[in-house]
Amino acid sequence: MALFKTLLRPLTRQRWWPRPGNGMSLEALLDSADPHAPLVERHLWLIQLIDWVRRGEPLSGTQYVVRLLATQPERRARVVALLAAFWRDTDVAALLADYGFSPRSSFLNELGERLRRKTLPGTPDTGDLARLFTLLFDDPNDDAWLARLDAATLAEMAVLWREALAEPTVSARTAGWREPFLDAIAYLVSQVRAAGMSPAFRGRLGTRVDDGIPDERDAGIPSQTVAAQLSDEQLGRQAFRQLGRAAERLHELSLTEAERPDGDNGPSTALLQEAQYLRALLDRCAQAASGLHGHLEAQGISVDLVFQIDQLCARCRRVEQLLEVILAPQPAPVLRNLLCELLEQGQRRRSVRALFSRHYAMLARKVAERSAETGEHYITRNRAEYRDMLRRAGGGGAVIAGTTYMKFAVVALGLSPFWAGLGAGLNYAVSFVIVQLLHWTVATKQPAMTAPAMAARLADTRTDEAVEGFVDEVAHLIRSQVAGIVGNLAVVGPLVLLAQVVAWWALGKPLISPAKAEYVLHSLTLLGPSLWYAAFTGVLLFASSIIAGWVENWFVLHRLDSALRWNPRIRLWLGADRAAYWAGWWRENISGLAANVSLGMMLGLVPVIASFLALPLDVRHVTLSMGQLMAAAGTLGPDVIHHPGFWWCAAAVPLTGLLNVGVSFVLALRVAVRSREVRVSDRARLRKAVWRRVRTQPLSFLFPPREAASASLAGSAAGPVEPRP
């Protein structure tokens, strides 16, 4: 493994091929500067120069290049001419407006773009500075040495660029060096305005604003009198409409400034006021876009919309940075900060993991919150709830007893692997849905739901009371899981065995053949891969909870409950009262149905797909395993207790339950904690508190304490909570 990592390490670096120009001296490199060379060769020369600077200590290398050019006029003239040609022939505005942003507003498109950039090489044969910038600064540490450039070096570099921009072919531009910055502002403003006026934003920013609202620009947008009469959504819509006009006025004033003889003495008052007004508009637009997060929290998360919101806010910040460069009396330090920001943003855009972690954070949080709402009903905190959990778990075990024999019946049909797996999946899914509709429970489904509920207790662990509250929640959770598993197994085993006894008495033969019974003992034994399969089943249990949260979020996002209630055709077909009832029913049960159906289908089909791919994967569900074991015992008769394989299978059942519950719980807890951005710095303190409770009150993890009953009765005065499957 160590050798394998060593061989792959060069492939995981940002740049692992030889750097161009490393074997060339600086003097030879400066002598090779040719302003009349083709575009791609000039770009290669710049890449080689930056690579030479980066060869040793970048800061001292930059200072050496600047000093050398200051003492050698001929080389300086060649470099200045090449820089002038570079500024003239490349699209600088593309770097300022496009670098770090996605050209499309789709999350999946951006994911594909990042994967393409990571796998495919770039070319310097381009006039787009945004594309070339990645090749010029491809080292992750470039922003660090640029940020450490001293004022004297920055001043010398500014003089060098000033000479390049004074060349006739460059100075002919109307607004001078500020022209690409103004163009970039125009591009960014148009994109922000288009995003703000898109259907996804427009439908969430409130109602239409009267076009007759005055355009007040004295201290912001609009005046205090007008603002008092408008909502935040209306102010946001007005700000998006005024962005284009504000950017055009800024451009016109900048052109006027460039034509003044004293234009280099600083911006005029009119330009400063217009820039301030544009900043106020951008702030309002960013606030309006950020305010959509609250709407998404209430109405469902759209990953694409979250991505568009982030892009819009980032473009607003970019415009403000460009304004700082244009208005700065000494633009060199501000421009250096902008370049460092561009480099950091470029590094972030290279990361596929960062894209997922950022834009799925809200979705993961909403999934966790919806699971937490359901999980609260799976946690017992007093004796009454504990007895109710045992009762509901017993009902679930009774249904699973029938599921066990239905599985044997599907296998007896002799179908092909796919259809056999589909039949088994439908059998599981129907059984789990029946358990849900009867308000019973299957123990292994609880952990993925209860983990987010417990993660909510980690939001504040700074006090001893909060730590003890977390330990209480752990005790409640473990006690609930034990009650659920005991209730399932206590019913499914005797019922399956009773069915075999009835079959012997009524039919003279068992419900399954001895060959199938022997196969059960062979497949469920602890000596085989049962524990590995049980852990994998825990992953499927966790996956079903994620699917349930995603489906419920999708249901809410597309307002299907409202459609079921108010759609004219549905109301005509069902009637107003029934339509309202079914809308509420689906809203309450969509998460459970998605979890049960997805879990059942995965338990049936995933082993078939894994077998087709030659993967060592199968499922071991503790309740189903117990039912199959009792069915095998009923076929083999009382002598089975002398069969060593029976006891190896019996020993595997509790471990199967432990892995089913433990794996799904740990995975769900990790998602819940990360989605809430909970940082538990005192984990050792929490572990000590849990172990202290284990030593002092071990039975509290198995049975509810007596004092909890009275406390819960006092708390239930506000009204009982109906348990939800």
Image: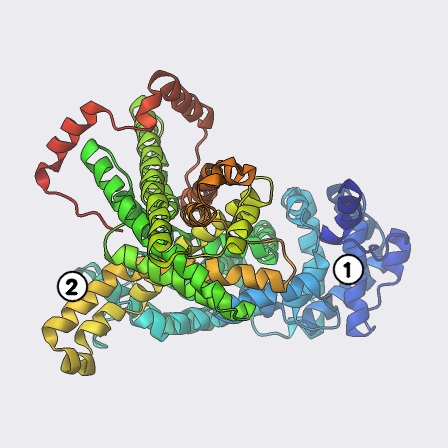
- Residue 92, located in which quarter of the rendered image? bottom right
Among the 4 quarters of the image, the one containing residue 216: bottom left
> Which residue is at the front of the view, 415 or 617?
415
**In the foreground, 179 or 528:** 528
Q: Nearer the viewer, residue 302 or 654?
A: 654
Q: Callout 2, which amino acid?
A: Gln
Q: Position of residue 205 (x, y in %)?
A: 28, 67
Residue 60, position as x, y percentages in the image: 76, 41
Task: Assess disc 1: are there few (<14), some (14-19) or many (≥20) residues with their C-alpha within 10 Å of its C-alpha.
Answer: many
Picture layout, residue 325 above or below residue 64 = below
User: Element type at marker 1?
Assistant: helix
Q: Mark 2 — residue?
A: 229
Looking at marks 2 and 1 on the same chain, the residue that comes earlier in the sequence is marked by 1
What residue is rendered at 82% in x and 55% in y?
19
User: Is 220 left or right of 93, judged from the image as shown?
Assistant: left
Q: Position of residue 278 (x, y in %)?
A: 39, 63
Crowding near the residue tagged with mark 2, few <14, some 14–19, many ≥20 C-alpha atoms within 10 Å: few
Amino acid type, residue under disc 1 in the picture: Ile
**Tally of numbered discs:** 2
Q: How is the image coloured?
A: rainbow
Proximity of marks 2 and 1: CB atoms separated by less than 8 Å? no
Q: Nearer the viewer, residue 333 or 103?
A: 103
- Would you name the residue on which mark 1 appears? 47
Q: Quadrant of residue 713?
A: top left
Apparent side of residue 384 relative to residue 27 in the rendered image (left or right): left
Query: What secondary structure is marked by label 2?
Result: loop
669 displayed left or right of 242: right
Q: Is residue 295 visible to us here?
A: yes
Residues at marks 2 and 1, CA–CA distance in whole angstroms: 56 Å
The quadrant of the rendering that contains the N terminus is: top right
Q: Can you see residue 287?
A: no
x then y, percent, for residue 642: 51, 36
